[in-house]
């Protein structure tokens, strides 16, 4: 076991790439039924969209060029981290800034995302404006995702992932840090803020969920919720979240009940994994955002290369303990909390609700008019500005502690 990070380069074995290529070449796209205009995605990804993706994958997509670009863009490493009885080999991106006073920033991804989502943040290590705050960027792959080894315990919860991430930051020499994330990353960061408030100085999320306020601790807030005294904007965002849970969450129930079974199908079928991922991201962005074919196929490749059911198991292991580990606990007052809320996201509660159930020390909160579940891809400049403003709102003493990390 090595506690010293080792440089990591992606190099997919020729036989693995040949297997993928053959499966794509021999893909069978089943026909779809005739849907009314505007309802083409009601039963899942249309066969016409799948055919376009498969044609592109077969005739145009070049994994070796993508592999080379990822290797040249990201400084990647792996390190062994012991968590309980297990030792995990954790894959992560680590870009250190040369600027004095740079701040450690942990970027936490979720599903069906991956470490590539941090790409647009890498420029924050050496910002063009000399007066702008610089950051050391760390972006781990969740255990069982992409190139991080998979836990063997059937109870590897969000709390344990949070412990792995904290140990990673300590291993890299960062005794204080802040975090940014959405989806599962938002819960991992909340767990870090709860478990390690001395080290985790602040977290900024773009996916905010909470339990109803306590009738004993927050009776007025609960009454406000029961009476549905929401603004028009709050009603729209809450309605979208309810729509997602009723109409679009079947994937999470399948992965959350029989993760191993569904993974046999997905990991053995590049086209199946492609359809699984592409269909889910369709309704998580603005209507005018077009998912590049290369991006979706690359995300699919990364999940295929993981070779395990970790991508699905997080929906079982994570959900089972999410309430007791995260949702019923409030982030300590010393930890700064910030949120950027995007209208096409599917996790949202109003600020007054979050103050009652998530954090007392909310130093930044912004409601945006455009954007969705993947702001680091769809509108990174907006998210970047919010993050910098969030950092500026953290208590000066704790900001100084962050800037001392070198």
Image (spheres, rainbow, N blue to C red):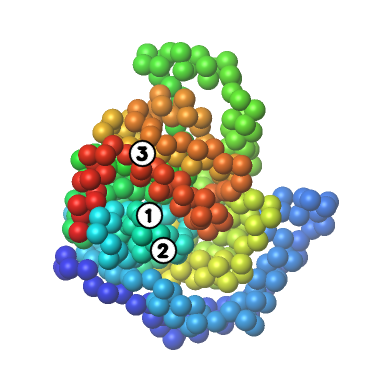
Residue in view at x 79 percent, y 58 percent: 33
Q: Position of residue 135 (x, y in %)?
A: 33, 57
Residue to which mark 3 is pinned: 393
- Kindly report which numbered mark, 1 or 3, lies closer to the viewer in this rendering: 1
Image quadrant where one finds the C terminus? bottom left
Establish if 125 lies above or below 38.
Answer: below
- Residue contact between numbered discs 2 and 1, judged by CB atoms under 8 Å: yes
Image quadrant where one finds the N terminus? bottom left
**Circle 1 — which element?**
loop
- Kindly report which numbered mark, 3 or 2, lies closer to the viewer in this rendering: 2
**Circle 2 — which element?**
loop
Q: Position of residue 153 (x, y in %)?
A: 29, 53
Q: Residues within 10 Å of mark 1 (few under 14, many from 20)?
A: few
C-alpha gap between disc 1 and disc 3: 14 Å
Residue to which mark 1 is pinned: 132
Residue to which mark 2 is pinned: 128
Q: Position of residue 396 (x, y in %)?
A: 26, 39
């Amino acid at each position: 076991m090595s506690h010293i990070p080792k440089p990591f380069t992606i190099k997919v074995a020729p036989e693995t790439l040949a297997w993928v290529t053959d499966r794509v070449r021999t893909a069978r796209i089943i026909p779809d039924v005739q849907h009314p205009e505007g309802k083409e995605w009601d039963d899942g990804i249309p066969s016409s969209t799948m055919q376009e993706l498969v044609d592109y994958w077969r005739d145009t997509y070049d994994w070796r060029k993508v592999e080379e670009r990822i290797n040249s863009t990201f400084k990647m490493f792996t390190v062994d981290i012991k968590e309980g009885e297990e030792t995990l080999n954790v894959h992560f991106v680590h870009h250190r800034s040369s600027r004095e006073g740079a701040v450690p920033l942990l970027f936490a991804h979720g599903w069906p995302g991956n470490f590539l989502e941090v790409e647009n943040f890498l420029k924050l290590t050496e910002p063009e404006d000399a007066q702008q705050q610089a950051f050391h960027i760390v972006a781990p792959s969740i255990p069982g995702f992409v190139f991080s080894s998979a836990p063997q315990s059937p109870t590897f919860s969000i709390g344990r992932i949070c412990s792995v991430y904290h140990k990673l930051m300590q291993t890299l020499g960062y005794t204080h840090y802040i975090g940014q994330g959405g989806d599962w990353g938002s819960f991992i960061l909340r767990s870090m803020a709860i478990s390690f408030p001395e080290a985790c100085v602040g977290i900024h999320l773009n996916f905010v969920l909470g339990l109803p306020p306590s009738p004993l601790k927050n009776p007025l807030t609960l009454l406000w919720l029961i009476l549905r005294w929401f603004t028009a904007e709050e009603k729209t965002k809450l309605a979208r979240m309810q729509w997602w849970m009723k109409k679009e969450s079947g994937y999470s129930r399948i992965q959350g009940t029989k993760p191993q079974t569904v993974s046999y199908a997905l990991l053995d079928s590049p086209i199946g994994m492609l359809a699984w991922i592409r269909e889910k991201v369709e309704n998580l962005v603005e209507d005018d955002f077009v998912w590049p074919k290369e991006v979706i196929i690359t995300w699919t490749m990364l999940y295929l290369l993981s070779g395990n059911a970790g991508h699905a198991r997080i929906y079982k292991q994570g959900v089972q303990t999410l309430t007791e580990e995260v949702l019923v606990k409030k982030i300590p007052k010393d930890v700064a909390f910030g949120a950027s809320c995007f209208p096409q996201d599917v996790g949202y509660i109003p600020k007054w609700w979050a103050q009652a159930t998530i954090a007392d020390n909310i130093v930044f909160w912004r409601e945006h008019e455009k954007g969705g579940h993947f702001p680091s891809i769809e509108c990174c400049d907006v998210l970047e500005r919010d993050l910098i403003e969030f950092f500026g709102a953290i208590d000066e003493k704790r900001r100084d502690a962050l800037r001392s990390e070198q």
